[in-house]
Image: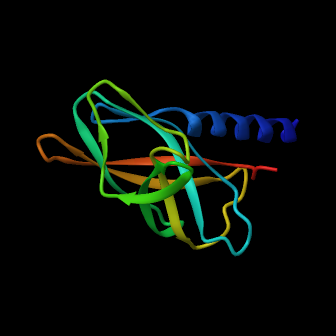
């Protein structure tokens, strides 16, 4: 019975962590990353962000890494190049898709330790509104198993 209770508590915790985060009319949904192998010092993080007003993601931080870069990909012919960028626009009432390595995403750089499947990574997103207010949103990204 106790084992069943622990499993239920773990499931409930996972459901609560995967729920949307709201702050100052900004919603962050489905944040996740993949587990990393020992020796790997970076990991991409994916999510959806919706803002009720024009805003921009201007930075992020995490105790799990030395830095977080905002990134996107450019495609020229058959060449793809990853670019670090200063901001990701969040148009009012538009869901910004940051769920592909080929589009906008975050990259944790200088990981302090490997990311383990089943755990979460704490992130703080820095959002700047049109009227130059800075909003910090705490998010927990689910760590999924590595791709096979």
Rendered location of residue 111, percent (x, y)? 57, 70
Q: Nearer the viewer, residue 71 or 15?
A: 71
Q: Is residue 36 above or below residue 10?
A: below
Q: Is residue 125 above or below residue 43?
A: above
Q: Nearer the viewer, residue 111 or 107?
A: 107
Q: Is residue 12 left or right of residue 26?
A: right
**Looking at the picture, how far across and down is residue 74, in whole percent?**
45, 50
28 to the left or right of 129: right
Q: Is residue 31 left or right of residue 49?
A: right
Extreme residue in the left direction: 131
Residue at the spot 30% in from the left edge and 57% down from the top edge: 86
Residue 37 quadrant: bottom right
**In which quadrant will I find the N terminus?**
top right
Q: Residue at x 70, y 75 (%)?
A: 39
**Horizontally, is 62 left or right of 130 in the view?**
right
Residue 53 position, x and y percent, is 22, 30
Please count the marks in the image. Answer: 0
Q: How is the image coloured?
A: rainbow
- Residue drawn 63% across and 33% down? 15
Residue 1 drawn above or below residue 141 = above
| Residue 33 in the image, given as x and y percentages of width and height | 61, 50
């Amino acid at each position: 019975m106790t084992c069943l209770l622990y499993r239920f508590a773990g499931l409930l915790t996972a459901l609560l962590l995967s729920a949307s985060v709201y702050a100052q009319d900004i919603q962050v949904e489905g944040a996740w990353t993949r587990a990393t192998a020992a020796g790997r010092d970076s990991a991409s993080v994916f999510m959806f962000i919706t803002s009720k007003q024009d805003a921009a993601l201007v930075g992020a931080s995490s105790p799990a890494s030395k830095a977080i870069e905002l990134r996107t990909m450019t495609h020229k012919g058959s060449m793809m190049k990853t670019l670090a960028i200063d901001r990701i626009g969040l148009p009012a009432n538009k869901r910004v898709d940051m769920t592909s390595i080929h589009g906008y995403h975050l990259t944790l750089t200088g990981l302090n330790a490997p990311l383990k499947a089943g755990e979460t990574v704490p992130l703080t997103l820095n959002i700047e509104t049109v009227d130059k207010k800075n909003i910090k949103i705490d998010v927990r990204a689910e760590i999924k198993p590595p791709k096979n």
